[in-house]
Amino acid sequence: MITLDRVARTFDGQPALAPTTLRFAAGQTTVVIGPSGCGKSTLLRLIAGLLQPDSGRVAIDGVEMHAGNEDQLRHTIGYVIQDGGLFPHLTARQNVALLARFLKRPPAWIAARIDELRVLVNLRGELLAHYPQQLSGGQRQRIALMRALMLEPKLLLLDEPLGALDPLIRAELQAELKSIFARLGKTVVLVTHDMNEAAHFADDIVLLRDGRVVQRGALDDLIKRPAEAFVGDFIRAQKSILDAKIRETGL
């Protein structure tokens, strides 16, 4: 579904992503993980066509992305960011319908699709009339997911979608999202810095460091067969953070 062929990107002369070649299989959930500043979000934005590579090429479902077709290809991609990215002056319903209305989809189709998605993400109908500031963090993320799925995209990209939520809501949405991914069977690329979240979602994990792919594989591969010392250090650090939090709370 996604091909990156020697794709690289710099900002102000500093490399954000070294020349990288990756393939993402259709129908799978791939989690891109790594420490802050390692290039995770840059990689996702290159796939989404929100950034242009300095070199290399990006192809979606066999079609190479370029200036002449990037808008068309973006319509086949759903994209969710950490805080949802909802427009504060629009209601939830208006946020979800925005691109479909711009593309002049029939009003009856828009209404039916919104109702279908509302059921999918388990959102009460009356909340669609609310503005983002009137919604909880979990509700905003449900709306953001509806908007990303509105045009029935082939590909779903999520950049730290649950990072700003409190732990209980985050755990609830993790379970719901995994169920939604399984039901829809879409190709999903999810960015996180949390190994527990990666383990929950991933069919495949890509671990980045300093703009380079350190290792790719199942969680079991990373734990039992680390490609280099950093892989083991990263996993142990995540476990240490979780253990410390458990001790602090007395759980």
Image (cartoon, rainbow, N blue to C red):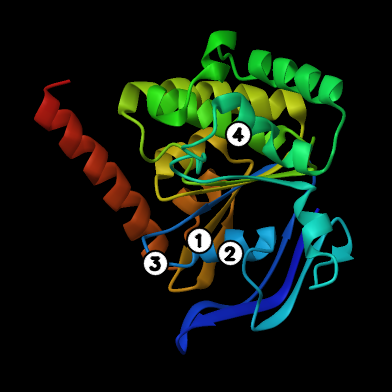
- Residue 184, image x, y percentages: 75, 28
Residue 43's label in the rendered image is 2
Q: Which residue is mark 1?
A: 40
Front: mark 4 or 3 = 4
Label 1 residue SS: helix
Of the numbered discs 2 and 3, the one sitting upstream in the chain is: 3
| Mark 1 nearby-residue class (10 Å; few <14, some 14–19, many ≥20) | many
Q: CA distance from mark 1 to mark 3?
A: 7 Å
| Mark 3 nearby-residue class (10 Å; few <14, some 14–19, many ≥20) | few
- Asked if marks 1 and 3 touch (Cβ < 8 Å), the reply is no
Residue at position x 32%, y 59% in the image: 233
- Asked if marks 2 and 1 touch (Cβ < 8 Å), the reply is yes
Q: CA distance from mark 1 to mark 4?
A: 26 Å
- Asked if marks 4 and 3 touch (Cβ < 8 Å), the reply is no
In this picture, residue 237 sits left or right of residue 25: left
In this picture, residue 62 sits left or right of residue 230: right
| Mark 2 nearby-residue class (10 Å; few <14, some 14–19, many ≥20) | many
Q: Which residue is mark 3?
A: 37
